[in-house]
Image (spheres, rainbow, N blue to C red):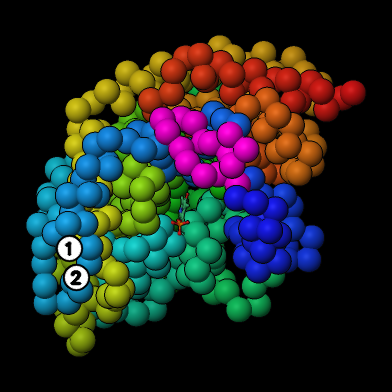
Amino acid sequence: MNQSDLQFDKEHIWHPYTSLIEPLPCYPVVSAQGVRLTLSDGKQLIDGMSSWWSTIHGYNNQRLNQAAKDQIDKMSHVMFGGITHPSAVALCRQLVDMTAQPLDRVFLADSGSVAVEVAIKMALQYWVAKGQKQKCRLLTVEHGYHGDTFAAMSVCDPVNGMHELFNNVLTKQLFAPAPQSRYDGEWDNNDLIELTALFEEHHHQVAAMIIEPIVQGAGGMRIYHPRYLTAVRQLCDKYDVLLICDEIATGFGRTGKLFGYQHANIVPDILCLGKAITGGYMTLAATITSQAIGEEICRTKAGVFMHGPTFMANPLACAVATESLKIIGENNWQQQVSAIESQLKRQLTPCLELPQVHDVRVLGAIGVVELKEAVDMAAIQQHFVELGVWIRPFGKLIYLMPPYIISSEDLSQLTAAIFSVISNKSE
Ligand SMILES: *Cc1c(COP(=O)(O)O)cnc(C)c1O
């Protein structure tokens, strides 16, 4: 890419959460292989982000490439209304096998946010079918992130959730304080006081509780105690509220378990999956519920679930996802993620000695360094690129979620870059 391409990009193309008036620099990536991104000047960067949780098997993966090529020669797309195809069936078979009983009714959506919209609509339609349409509010916790569409925005953190701007049009939902008990710390029963009070007071109006199991991602990279999730399940049962687990970030091994809900041995009523599902090749997501809930949803006057995207179950995406889940099924991820976890603990913990650092937390293939002050994004990004790594902080958070296939040497380069960038900040 030449200067004129970059200038065109700057003037005409929106990037995620960016200004058209004062755009921050964008780095031109022309190819990628394994854990490395190649910039147009030939420089290589080790990717610490897995392109936002998704590229778990690495870039340009031979098996995923082959799956895409095989499928593209048969059929790239066909509508899903009144038609089915082998890649959708193969993928959904695997999803049903991998997830807990009784989750076995799969809705394939085209992005994570849409999977969350679908989960919320399922919950609302379920209560309409039950003759309880007053149960139409959602309960969630602060510091959550569930996507950028309207229903999803309504359950993102009301302050940090990046959507304050839209507060006057967003549905007012119920927010409990985020759990304070850390995953690796003591359990504190006080975490349940306000949550329990919200259930007691509002359960007649609440359709579902939605939560990211164990790790809250983009809303703060917080890692909380499994007992909280166990209690959430119990409260949902006691008060007749559906439980939606949003595993779009945590699913497929990222936290050290195949799914985050397994840390607490619970099963949600509705499960959202996305991001890593295709190994980061293309957009696809899934919302899975049980036969009982699925059938109840269809007992409204309409007789059907009221959702159906144009690109539902896109065969190319399904074929790649099927291969990606096959790789997961071979179970190397467990060893890879636990090795990443030990190394992150070993190499990020020393950051605690730096005066700029407030906290360090690690779970599975997720490592977070929380600073006391927000970072200067453009400066820190440039510094990381100079050090040969791709790490994209937000606010006070510098974090890693590398591809599972990363080598120990490459991971060391990522953690060393973080230490170096933070210590240089004081100069
Ligand atoms: C990324 C994310 C979403 C939204 O997914 P998109 O594919 O960006 O629409 C929803 N929930 C969680 C937990 C996420 O991490």
Camera-near label (2 vs 1) is 1
**Residue at disc 1, secondary structure:** loop
Whether residue 370 is situated above or below residue 268 in the rendered picture: above
Residue 424: percent from left, percent from top: 82, 23
The residue that label 2 is drawn on is 78
Residue contact between numbered discs 2 and 1, judged by CB atoms under 8 Å: yes
Residue 83 % position (x, y): 11, 72
Amino acid marked by disc 1: Met
Residue placed most toward the observer, 398 or 137:
398
Percent position of residue 378, x then y: 76, 44
Q: Amino acid at mark 2?
A: Val
Which residue has dot 1 on it? 75
Q: Is residue 260 left or right of residue 163?
A: left
Q: Is residue 37 magenta?
A: yes
Q: Vertically, is 254 above or below 171?
A: above
Work out whether residue 178 can be spotted: no
Q: Which residues are magenta?
A: 28-42
Q: Is residue 368 magenta?
A: no
